[in-house]
Amino acid sequence: MKQLKNIRKAGFTLVEIMIVVAIIGLLAAIAIPNFVKARATSQQNACINNLRQFDAAANQWALEKSKVSNATCSLSSDLNAYIKLNATGKVPGCPAGGTYTDTITIGTNPVCTYSSLATAAHALQ
């Protein structure tokens, strides 16, 4: 006589897999907007730090060249000696894709042209 063995195959049921996928989707729906916000905040802070560095470089340039307030200097040529340049030897750009004005007036804050409805503008205050 044949003996039937009770063999149970190991594995997951469709319902168990669907529950796991739903939980992962829920966690992703919560986490992804937080990652996007953290990235935008980080880019804004890096841009503001660049603007702070440009302002300090412009003030140092004006002091060394005996310039008065409202004098203008060029970010790309006059301030190269006062700014830590990037790997390509150029002034660092806005991490979010904005652009910096090339002319800086002594006594006023440098400006980044980045603007987005999702995040605050990049401005040195």
Image (cartoon, rainbow, N blue to C red):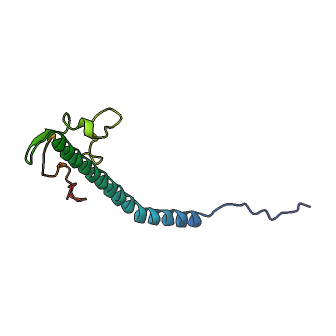
Q: Residue furthest right?
A: 1
Provide residue 31's location: percent of width, then percent of height.
42, 63
Q: Is residue 26 left or right of residue 97?
A: right
Q: Is residue 41 above or below residue 15?
A: above
Q: Position of residue 39 (x, y in %)?
A: 35, 55
Closer-to-camera residue (117/124): 124
Q: Is residue 100 visible?
A: no
Residue 13 can be seen, yes or no? yes
Residue 25 at x, y = what percent? 46, 63
Furthest residue to the left? 70
Name which quarter of the figure residue 13 lies in.
bottom right
Q: Is residue 102 above or below residue 117?
A: above
Identify the residue at horizontal 28%, vertical 34% (top origin). 90
Percent position of residue 27, x then y? 46, 65
- Frontmost residue, 15 versus 113: 113
Q: Quadrant of the N terminus?
A: bottom right
The total number of labels drawn is 0
Left or right relative to 118: residue 24: right
In which quadrant will I find the C terminus? bottom left
Is 99 situated left or right of 7 in this image?
A: left
Residue at 22%, 59% (x, y): give it: 120
Query: Measuring 36% from the left and 61% from the top, which residue is drawn there?
Result: 33
Residue at 17% over, 44% down: 63
